[in-house]
Amino acid sequence: MFRKWVDIPPVWLAVCLALAWVQAHRFPMGLSFGPVWADLLGGLLVGGGALLAALALAEMRRHHTSFMPHDEAAQLVTSGIFKRTRNPIYLGDGMILAGFILFWDAVLALPLLPVFVWVIEKRFIEPEEMRLQRKFLARYAKYSQQTRRWL
């Protein structure tokens, strides 16, 4: 039960965001991404990531299936934003992390992005895909061939 509510992607995202914030505000090391473009791009990434996640959550709700990564899916959702990416919520989380790193000028926190993606793939995406493959068989196989994991 504890794992279900603590070992979830938003917690991993929050930890990475906290580390990036600490790096930016406590240990800036005189490094910078540059002028206003980083703030603008950072804001666009955060907003785009939040929109992507919201669209995915709405689509999952419309299909009456769980969005919790450790739960069994009631439906295989392949419509809406899921036509473009199999993992729009995780993609949105990555965009949010990248956006805040840019916005906060947390240059030394950039390695958190590939670490976050790796953790999400190993802890959540791969187990979810195995469960979907077992439950939806040929439908999931076809969907995974037609739709990329990330983009």
Image: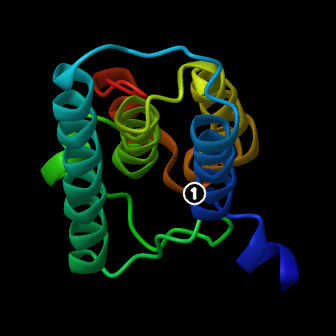
Q: Is residue 84 visible?
A: no
Q: In which quarter of the image is the N terminus?
A: bottom right
Asked if residue 124 shows in the view, the reply is yes
**Side (left or right) of 2 relative to 41:** right
Where residue 136 appears, as percent x and y from the top left, is 49, 52
Where on the picture, by quarter, is residue 112? top right
The quarter of the rendered structure image containing the C terminus is top left
Q: Residue at x 20, y 50 (%)?
A: 47
* Secondary structure category for the residue under label 1: helix
Q: Where is residue 48 in the image (x, y as percent from the top left)?
A: 20, 45
Say which residue appears at 22% left-offset and 42% top-offset: 43
The residue identified by callout 1 is 135
Residue 86 location (% of width, % of height): 37, 39
Please give left or right for residue 113 compared with residue 77 in the image: right
In the figure, is residue 41 to the left or right of 9?
A: left
How far from the left and from the top, in percent, is residue 102? 38, 29
Residue pictured at 61% horizontal, 40% vertical = 20
- Count residues near mark 1 (Cα–Cα under 10 Å), then give few for <14, some for 14-19, many for 20+: some
Q: What residue type is labelled 1?
A: Lys
Name the side, left or right, on which 11 lies relative to 139: right
